[in-house]
Amino acid sequence: MAGFLDRAKDQAQRGLAQGKQKIDEVQTQRAGADLLKKLGAAYFAERRGSGNPQATQRALEAVERHVATHGDGSLHG
């Protein structure tokens, strides 16, 4: 009986770890999507004359930092 409970406990812990990993991946992808959205908005504003190149550059640098930390896959759903 103890062996069964140990295996069940191990399986439950693995499931929790996998669930947490998936949640972390989704949150990272959402953060990447938000950064891309901000970059697009900054670029659009700059092209329309209501933004500036510095804001676009800052947004681009934020995306680049995100990719450097989390990889290119963090920008895809």
Image (tube, rainbow, N blue to C red):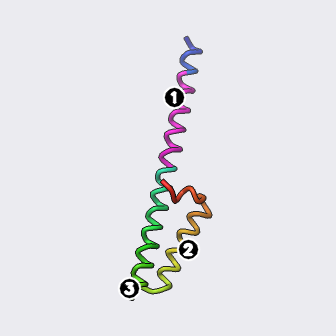
Disc 1 element = helix
- Label 2: how many residues lie within 10 Å, few (<14), some (14-19) or many (20+)? some
Residue furthest to the bottom in view is 49
- Residue 9 in the magenta stretch? The answer is yes
Residue 73 at what x, y percent from top left? 56, 56
User: Residue at left 60%, top 58%?
Assistant: 71
Q: Which residues are magenta?
A: 8-24
- Residue 19 in the magenta stretch? The answer is yes
- Give the residue at mark 1: 12
Disc 3 element = helix
Residue 56 at what x, y percent from top left? 48, 79
Q: Is residue 2 above or below residue 50?
A: above
Specify the label residue 61 is tagged with.
Answer: 2
User: Residue at left 41%, top 79%?
Assistant: 44
Residue 15 at what x, y percent from top left? 52, 33
For the image, the number of numbered tags is 3
Residue 2 at what x, y percent from top left? 57, 14
3D distance between C-alphas at marks 2 and 3: 21 Å
Specify the label residue 48 is tagged with.
Answer: 3
Residue furthest to the front in view is 47
Q: Indicate the quadrant where residue 68 lies.
A: bottom right
Majority secondary structure in the magenta region: helix
Q: Is residue 58 above or below residue 28?
A: below
Kindly identify the amino acid type of the residue bearing the numbered disc 1. Ala
- Label 1: how many residues lie within 10 Å, few (<14), some (14-19) or many (20+)? few
Q: Indicate the quadrant where residue 41 lies.
A: bottom left
Q: Is residue 25 above or below residue 16?
A: below
